[in-house]
Amino acid sequence: MSAAPLLSRPSPSADLLFRDVHVLDPRTGFDGRHDVRVRAGELAELGAAGTLEAEDVEVVDAQGRYHLLPAFFDTHVHLRTPGQEHKEDLETGTRAAAAGGFAGVIAMPNTDPVVDSAALLGSVREVAAREARVPVGFLPAITVGSAGVQLTEMAEMRDGGALGFSDDGRPVSSAAVMRKALRYQRLCGGVLALHEEDVSLAGKGVMHEGAVSAALGLAGIPSVSESTMVARDAALAAYEHGRVHFQHLSVHESVEAVAAAKAQGVSVSAEVTPHHLLLCDEQVRGLDSSTKVNPPLATESDRQALIEGLRSGVIDCVATDHAPHAREEKEVPFEQAPMGTTGLETAFAVLYTELVLGGVLELSLLVERMTAGAGLFELPVHRIAAGEVANLVLMDLDARWTAGEHGWESRSANCAFAGRALRGRALLTVAAGAVAYRERSFSLVAV
Ligand SMILES: [Zn+2]
Ligand SMILES: [Zn+2]
């Protein structure tokens, strides 16, 4: 690949001193109070708390109350450009990302038109280079129009900066087409990121098939719609020596299929969303369309299997599948509403509140899984160490807030967690060496 894989708008490099901040980075081993100097966008120096001189720059005096974490990376977002800017665009979507502590995202191609050519990829990359607040990478489509029939010009798009390919929103239904994509991937590289759904099993389903769908009288989508496709594509990847990433796992059978593939040494990875980690089909009983997502929220035991998969590393990373929809599109009867929830602004706080404060996962493990996605797409993983580009989030873990209480940075409000009482809020995000977000009520103390 010759073109830069991630693009964002030109921004002045940050010069900051974080004083007495709790630095936590599971990769470099920091877990304690330090001073951290960012000079010209680079992590220039770390020292014992209270030892670094201010040097006429902005100082964040944390007094030990705030955490400094490597900024998060999201392997799965929908930024809706081109063609659906009434839902989101590159600027609003990446503003939401920065507000959630993310310093890098990967955008899906199911826009209008579908990003399925080098020309279209070039034009969305130009928009990102003008408007994006945090670096954005792109996965153009595997098949023309994501119709599942004819492969796109994968090699040409790799040269044009594609991180890999995805038909997200749809599966690659034909095993023969999938096999062909794996053979082209061997030549051009990049990751095939797969939305796994057997459309002949999913049918017209609008939620998970089980006791709740039966009680509500709604058409269900069975677990095997996802898990049989995960198993099929793991087998094809093994046969063709390919590299696949499974998107948004939702049921325990899929976790088992990924574990089996990994045990056999197949080059697979997997992501899980905050909503699948925290919600289940019981939450759909109220028929709130913000709980209508694809894949659907499954059962409590599926949710437990996803948490265990994330803990054990069978699931490599958290991804939001941030899927904005306009209010009028979601304010229709449940059966007719489009699938998807926003997630960038709440991802860390919902997981921290429920899983870390709930005693289920360690904070350091959550940080690891919220940053690991970059490495799966052959990108540098954000790290806190001298000499690294600054990709940081300053987090107030004690902050209490209600999701959506002051509106959203995203253009859309269809968040499954709206109204939830949360703990943990990003105060400042530095992405690729530049300040990408400052919390409104948080002002830096200048010396
Ligand atoms: Zn999907
Ligand atoms: Zn998606």
Image (spheres, helix red, strand yellow):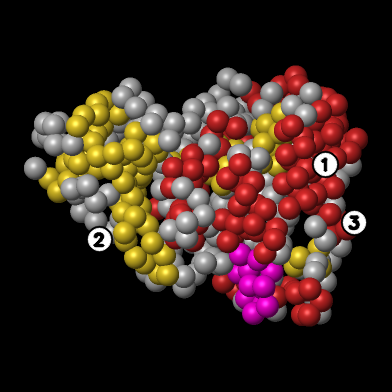
Dot 3 corresponds to which residue?
Answer: 200
| 156 or 101: nearer the viewer | 101
1 vs 3, front mark: 1
Q: Does the residue labelled 2 lie within 8 Å of ligand 2?
A: no
What residue span does the magenta drawing correspond to? 279-291
* Quarter of the image that includes the N terminus: top right
User: In which quadrant of the rendered view does residue 260 lie?
Assistant: top right
**Where 84 sits versus 29, above or below?**
below
- Work out how far the residue at label 2 is from the one at label 1, CA to CA, in angstroms: 48 Å
Image-based side of 92 in relation to 235, left or right: left
CA neighbours of label 3 inside 10 A, class few (<14), some (14 to 19), many (20+): few
Amino acid identity at mark 3: Ser
User: In which quadrant of the rendered view does residue 56 lie?
Assistant: top left
CA neighbours of label 1 inside 10 A, class few (<14), some (14 to 19), many (20+): many
- Work out how far the residue at label 2 is from the one at label 3, CA to CA, in angstroms: 50 Å
Amino acid identity at mark 1: Ala
**Where 44 sits versus 336, above or below?**
above
- Residue at the image position 49 percent from the left and 27 percent from the top: 380
The numbered dot on residue 231 is: 1
CA neighbours of label 2 inside 10 A, class few (<14), some (14 to 19), many (20+): few
**Position in image of residue 294 (x %, y %):** 70, 59
**Position in image of residue 122 (x %, y %):** 59, 34
Dot 2 corresponds to which residue?
Answer: 441
- Residue at the image position 63 percent from the left and 72 percent from the top: 283
**Position in image of residue 272 (x %, y %):** 62, 49
Sequence-wise first label, 2 or 1: 1
